[in-house]
Amino acid sequence: MSSKRTRNPIGGHVPVAGGLASVGLTYAREMGAETVQVFVANPRGWATPVGNPRQDEAFRAACAAEEIPVWVHAPYLINFGSHTEATALKSVESLRHSLRRGREIGALGVVVHTGSATGGREREVALRQVREYLVPLLDELTHDDDPYLLLESTAGQGSSLCARTWDFGPYFEALDAHPKLGVCLDTCHIFAAGHDLAGPGGMKQTLDLLVDTVGEGRLKLIHANDSQDVVGARRDRHANIGSGHIGEEPFQELFTHPATDGVSLIIETPGGKAGHAADVARLKELRGQ
């Protein structure tokens, strides 16, 4: 790992089973990461495990010393638009846990998927429920070192509440554009949802639309993933940087947009450690061009 001190720190999601510091930091160093994202719970379960204070402290201290921005990804099961009350209530506990653990390890933000309106309910009804459950959680973020809550849109599959850039508008309105609210933009998701990042000026246009919708300073994190599928396919299948339908040029364009100044890039691409190291290196090349 290396000190950020760049316009856009580049890194990836790192495994932490076996130790946040001992496993996670080792993996991060081997992939050349300048920023890291972690899970603090099983991403496909509802468990809310307590951390290991020694690992937490070692991880937080190392990242602080080397100026490595840290991000947490909340579990995938969370859906505040669910018509099932048990799912909504479990979502509250799961996200509260991720936010608390995020603060304990020094994370700047916690990423949560924006969810979907299940059970055939109307989008407006689902967004009212999102408000009911999420505003109190946001209001709990009163410490100076509390992380931001970062909304990540989906690839547009099913009855998704947020897929295109303008879908963030009603979502932000439902949450009173809370000061602790931000956006995590996943390049594969937004491409799959229909924004042609690969077209002429496509990345700039998409970022402009996002800023027009949520305002300046709300984009806090980018998940930098190429796409195995064509634009508008509504399929969430990540590809390595430059080997998918987005290609390298839009990522180069991304580095020059005012909205991305200071924003970390996290890859979530295939290929294990070797693939991750290659993608981090490629993005660093594009950043320097």
Image (cartoon, grey):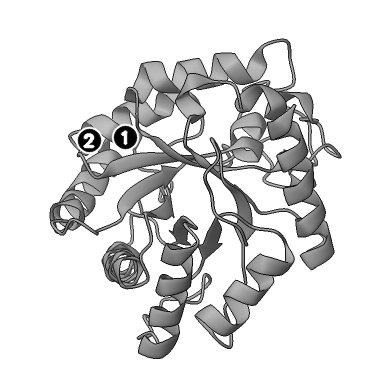
In this rendering, position of residue 113 left or right of residue 26: left
Q: Is residue 284 above or below residue 267?
A: above
Q: Is residue 93 left or right of residue 211?
A: left
- Residue at 42% x, 53% y is 112
Q: Is residue 31 left or right of residue 8?
A: right
Residue 16 visible in the displayed image: yes
Residue visible at 66% across and 54% down in the picture: 268
- For the point 53% across and 71% down, which residue is it? 44
* Residue contact at pointers 1 and 2, CB within 8 angstroms: yes
Residue 176 lies in what quarter of the image?
top left
- Residue 187 lies, with reference to residue 67, above or below; the image says above
The answer to whether any part of residue 40 appears in the image is no
Viewer-closest of 48 and 133: 48
- The residue beneath circle 2 is 174
Q: Position of residue 64 (x, y in %)?
A: 41, 64
**Up-down relation of residue 223 to residue 173 (above or below):** below
Residue designated by label 1: 171
Question: Which residue type carries mark 1?
Answer: Tyr
Residue 148: image x %, image y %?
31, 50
Q: Which mark is residue 30?
A: none
**Disc 2 element:** helix
Q: Amino acid at mark 2?
A: Ala
Q: Nearer the viewer, residue 204 or 36?
A: 36
Tell me the element at label 1: helix
